[in-house]
Amino acid sequence: MATKSRYPFLFWPFANPLASLAPVLRVFRGASFAWFLVCAAAAQALVVAERDFSALVAKADLILEGTVTRIEEAPDERGIQRTLVHLSDLLVHKGVPDSSEFVLDIAGGTKGGFRAEILDLPRFAVGDRVLLFVRGNGHAVFPVVGVHQGYFRVVPDDRGTPRVVRSDGLPVIGRSRRALRFPRKTSDTARGVPLDQFREWIRDELQRPAEAKEPE
């Protein structure tokens, strides 16, 4: 069952809050005001339903691995600020990306001295290797199935074996029926499953008969 998101929308000025109110006034002019309203409305509409692994695979338009090479901000055609995360060195498990580079399009960004963002969303950093279950790119507030549930990072252990961890750093340690299993506390990534094992789980789900999968 869908529950209301725990990710409230936040607007905050980079300047000292006791400084001039000019930036506050500027945000309510023209496109900036539209940007404020659309972002706020999107935040109200964001819901996060619990998804098991089968649902992550079934609901994703794209399942891919990629390395973050660049993060930029740009307005869309309506003047709404977006954050664009560029991924290269792709390995695609489901779907067909438009090119050899994939751009994850996330609502929010900085404009007129203010930043609009949804608190606690998974973060990206240049150089990260990520594995994403993408849905509604360019349309959704955060186009990843289940928000944090469909976002994984690939982190090498001490021996260089790539392993899979969640956005908060918890390693994936196994599967229980259809659900992924995680430890209670952040621990050594060596406890996490190898990336090859995780890829095999994805392949297994994609090969399951359609009638056995969760309906859309």
Image (cartoon, rainbow, N blue to C red):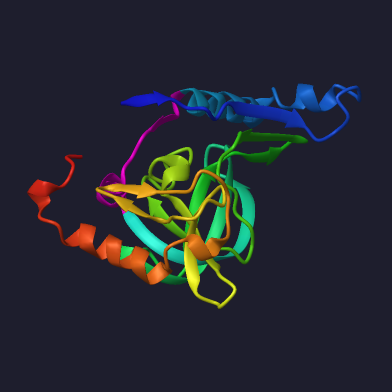
Q: Residue at x 48, y 66 (%)?
A: 163
Q: Residue at x 39, y 49 (%)?
A: 181
Q: Which residues are magenta?
A: 45-61
* 30 and 43: which is toward the camera: 43
Is residue 59 covered in magenta? Answer: yes
Give how far across and how far down residue 59 sits, in percent: 28, 46
Is residue 174 covered in magenta? Answer: no
Q: Residue at x 52, y 65 (%)?
A: 190
Give how far across and how far down residue 91 sits, in percent: 39, 71
* 44 and 145: which is toward the camera: 145
- Quadrant where the C terminus sits is top left
* 148 and 99: which is toward the camera: 148
Q: How many marks?
A: 0
Task: Locate residue 178 relative to residue 108 in the image: left or right.
Answer: left
Q: Is residue 66 above or below residue 110?
A: below
Whether residue 111 is visible:
yes
Q: Is residue 81 above or below residue 131?
A: above
* 45 and 197: which is toward the camera: 197
Give how far across and how far down residue 192 sits, in percent: 47, 61
- Quadrant where the N terminus sits is top left
Q: Of all residues shown, which one is farthest toward the bottom?
A: 159
Give how far across and how far down residue 87 sits, in percent: 51, 64
Q: Residue at x 68, y 28 (%)?
A: 11
Residue 29, picture quadrant? top right
Whether residue 154 is visible:
no
